[in-house]
Image (spheres, rainbow, N blue to C red):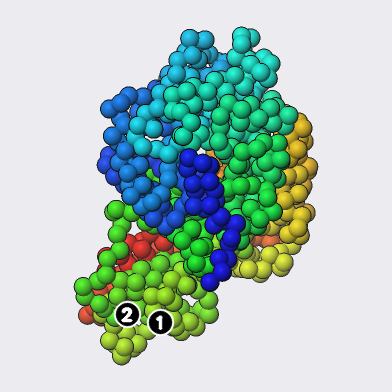
Amino acid sequence: MRNPFPNIFKPLDLGFIRLPNRIVMGSMHTGLEEAKGGIDRLAAFYALRARQGVGLIITGGVAPNITGWLKPLGMTLNTRWKVHKHRKIVDAVHREGGRICMQILHAGRYGFHPFVMAPSAIKSPISPFKPFSMPEWYIRKTIRDFGRAAFLAKKAGYDGVEVMGSEGYLLNQFMAPHTNKRKDKWGGSLENRMRLSLEIVREIRRRTGEDFLIIFRISLIDLVREGSVWYEIVALAQALENAGVHILNSGIGWHESRVPTIASMVPEGAFVPLTKRLKEVVNIPVVATNRINYPEQAEGLLQRGEADLVSMARPFLADPGWVSKSSKGNTDSINPCIACNQTCLDRIFKGQVAGCMVNPQACMETVRVIRPTAYPMKIAVVGAGMAGMVFSATAASRGHDVTLYEKKGELGGQFNLAGKIPGKENYFQTIEYYTQRMKESGVHLKLSEEFDVIKAHNEGYHAIVVATGVRPRIPDIKGIQLPHVMDYVQAIDHPDKIGQRVAIIGAGGIGFDVALLLSEQQVPAVDRHRAYCDFWGIDLNVKTPGGLIEPRKTLSSRQVFLLQRSKGKMGAKLGKTTGWIHRLTLRKRGVQMIAGVEYSRIRSDGLEVIIKGEKRLLEVDHIVLCAGQEPTHVVPSNLRDLPIPVHIIGGAKDASGLDAERAIHEGFELGRNI
Ligand code: NAP
C-alpha cells in the first residue's frame, strides 16, 4: 500500500543520528518525574510511544541545578548518582527502537521556590517568589551546570538534549528586555542578551562532542511587552546554528502571556507561519509546534516546506499510537486531543500527576492495564453518553458481550452539546473515536430504544450498567415556567432562537460555554486565523516587541448578562489554564459578568434581581438556565430489584461535580474491572 503520508515518514539523517520519521513528541512535564515510583511509570509511558513509532521523544524539563527548579525537589541532573534513574528511561525507549533527548530547563523567575534567580530582580506574575538577580559568577556556574547536565545525559544514554530557550524560562528571560535590565555584559545590547544561550550551547558542545544531538527551543514570539522582535530572533537563531545547534524547535508565547497559544480556541497550526519564516533564515532543520493534531495537517505543512519536523505533546497523551496508526492510514482510529487541558496541564499546575481526559490510561500505563476477562458476561448498558460508551468499548474489548441502549438517536450525550461551543468542535471526534472502538470490539448498538425491566429479563443479561447521565437543574425561581426561559440544552441546540438581550443564570463551565456561544461573532472558517490574531492583538510579523499589537475591539452583538449567586471571582472553578481565557474573552466582548446576584423573579419583560442590596430589572428577551445538573432517572426503580448486579456510573450516580473526565474515567474503570 502507498504510504498516505510520505512527508511524515521521510527519514531525517543528521549523519550521526537518523530519525525514521518527522514526528517529535514534545516535552511535557507529567509529574511522574517527582512521584514515588514515578520513574518506572515514566519509562513505560515513553517506551509505549517509542514502540508505536514516534520519531524522537523529548523528556519533560530537567533542571541543571537547584536554582533552576520549577518547584522544590524538581527533577535535576547535576550529579553522577542521578544518572541511573535516567538510564532506566533511556533504556526502556532504546529497547523499543526509539530515540530520546533530555530537555534541560532552568525555570529562572518562573520557579516556585525561594531560591529563584533571574537576570534581574523582577517578580513574574505567575510565581509568588521574587527572584534574585543572578550574579556574574553564578551565570558562569549556570553555563557549566548546563554543560554538566548534558554530559551526564550523554552518560545516561540519551541521544541528545533540548535546551529550553523559550516560554519565558531563564534563557528567554535573558534574551528579552522585558525581564533583562542588566547593565553588564549579560544585558543591554542584543549581543549581550544572547550571550547566555550561546555560551551554554558552546559549553554543551564542548562537554558532549560532535555526535550528540543539540536542539534549542527558541521563542519565535514572546507575546509579552518588551519581548524580542523578529530581527533579534533571527540573529539568535543564526548564532545558535553557528554555535553547533542541530535542530531549532519553535517556542510560542511566555507562560505569563495573556494570549492563549495552545487552548482549544486557538486555530489549528496558528503559529506555523513563524516556523516557516525561521526555516527561510537558517540551514538546520526546524520544528513546528502548537495546535497540530492530525496527520493530514502535519503532512500538509511538511509538504509545503513550512517545517522539517512536527512536534506534538498532548496528542501523545490522548493516543500513544498516533504514529503507527498514521503509518497504516488508520487516521479514523486516532483518539484526538481536544485541547481541554483539564487533566494534563491543569493537574500539573495543581502539583498532581498528569493524565488525559479522553485517554484514562495516559501516565497510568503500568497501573490501568486492560486484561481479557476470564468470565465473559452478557451486559446491558443504558445510556450512550461518554460514560456508557467508554464502558462499553472497554468491557467489550475484554471479551464481554455488551449491548448499549440509547433512547435518543445519537451517541455521545453531553459531548454533542460541547461540540457546538466555538473552539470545541473536535469533541465530536472523541465521540467518533469511541464509536469506532465500540464497533471494533463488537458492541451491539440499540439506538432510539428505551431499556426496560422486561428486556432485562428476556435477554438474560448478567449485569446492567446505568449511565443515563444528567439533566439540567431547574432552579426554584418565581416565573421559571414563562416561555422565554430555556435550559442550556435548548440554548445550545438553538442559539438562533435567542433574542438580542439574554441573561444566563449560573456561571459554571456550562454558563461560560453558553455565554461564549451567544456572544460570538460568526467568522467564516477562512478568516478564523486572522480574527484570532486581531482579537488577541498578535503581530505574526513580530515587528513590534513580543509580537503584540493593539487588539481589535470585537463586541458581542447580543447584550449578555452572565450571573452567579456566589460572591467573588466569576467561574472560580474553571480550569487554571483556560478559565482566564474564558473570562478575558467575555470581558473583551462586553459580556456583563455579575457575581453576588439574588434572583427575585422572572417577569415577561426580564429578570428581576438584587445586586448589592439593590433591586434591578435586567430587561432581556431570554433567560438561559445553566444552574448545574441533576441525575436523570429514566431507569425504572424496580431494576434494582433484579437478581443481577446493577452498576451506576457517571452523572446518573452523582451529578454534583460531574464533568467529562469523571464520566469517562468511571466508565473506563468499571469496564476494566467488571
Ligand atoms: P457547575 O460548574 O456546577 O455550575 C453551576 C452553576 O449554577 C454555578 O455557577 C452555580 O453558582 C449555579 N447554581 C447552582 N445551583 C443553582 C440554583 N439552584 N439556582 C441558581 N443558580 C444555581 O455546573 P455546570 O456549569 O453545569 O457544569 C457541569 C460540569 O461540567 C462542571 O464540572 C464543569 O466544570 C464542567 N464543564 C466545564 C467546562 C469548562 O471548564 N470550560 C465547560 C462545560 C462544563 P451559584 O450557586 O454561585 O449561583
Left or right of 669, for residue 514: right
What residue is pinned by disc 2? 401
Q: Residue 74: x and y, percent?
A: 38, 31
In the picture, residue 246 is in which quadrant?
top right
Question: Does residue 441 lie above or below 299 as drawn?
Answer: below
Q: Nearer the viewer, residue 208 or 510?
A: 208
Residue lying farthest to the front in this orientation: 15
What residue is pinned by disc 1? 444
Residue 307 makes an appearance in the image:
yes
Q: Residue 496: x and y, percent?
A: 72, 66
How packed is label 1: few (under 14 Cα within 10 Å), some, or many (20 or more)? some
Q: Secondary structure at mark 1?
A: strand
The residue sitting at 44% across, 28% down in the picture is 208
* Amino acid at dot 2: Asp
* Amino acid at dot 1: His
Distance from disc 1 to disc 2, alpha carbons, whole Å, reads 8 Å
The residue sitting at 77% across, 55% down in the picture is 527
Q: Residue 307: x and y, percent?
A: 64, 47
The residue sitting at 72% across, 51% down in the picture is 529
